[in-house]
Image: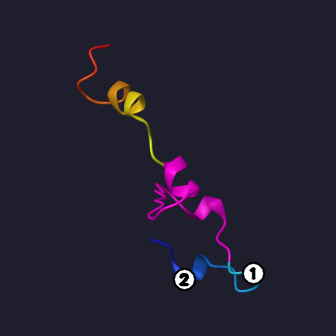
Amino acid sequence: MIREADISTTDNTIPSNKIANARIYYIGEGDNYDRSQSGFLTDAVSSKYWMF
């Protein structure tokens, strides 16, 4: 969540030190969406069932 008071009125931006635990999701189709998705190997290594 972003507080309205943290948004700059001159250029409609928010300083990065005012954002904590941000998660950014790309939903849709095309190159940006394809590149934002992790591959099967990354999913396997980062899963909680990885033995190492």
What stretch of residues is rendered in magenta? 13-36
42 part of magenta stretch: no
Q: Nearer the viewer, mark 2 or mark 1?
A: 1
Please tell me which residue is depicted at 60% across the width and 76% down the height of the picture. Answer: 6
Q: Which residue is mark 2?
A: 4
What's the colour scheme? rainbow
Which of marks 1 and 2 precedes in the sequence? Answer: 2
Instruction: Give the position of the N terminus as an image quadrant.
Output: bottom left
Q: Horizontal and vertical percent for residue 20?
A: 50, 57
Q: Secondary structure at mark 2?
A: helix
Q: Is residue 35 left or right of residue 11?
A: left
Left or right: 8, with 49 as reference point: right
Q: Is residue 14 left or right of residue 39?
A: right
Closer to us: 9 or 42: 42
Tell me where residue 2 appears, x and y as whole percent: 50, 73
Q: Residue at x 58, y 64 (%)?
A: 18
- Residues at discs 2 and 1 in contact (Cβ within 8 Å): no
Between the residue at mark 2 and the residue at mark 1, the CA separation in whole angstroms equals 14 Å
Q: Is residue 19 magenta?
A: yes
> Disc 1 marks which residue?
11
Determine the main secondary structure of the stretch shown in magenta: loop
Instruction: Determine the image quadrant of residue 28.
Output: bottom left
Residue 49 marker:
none
Instruction: Name the quadrant containing residue 27.
Output: bottom left
Q: Name the amino acid, label 1.
A: Asp
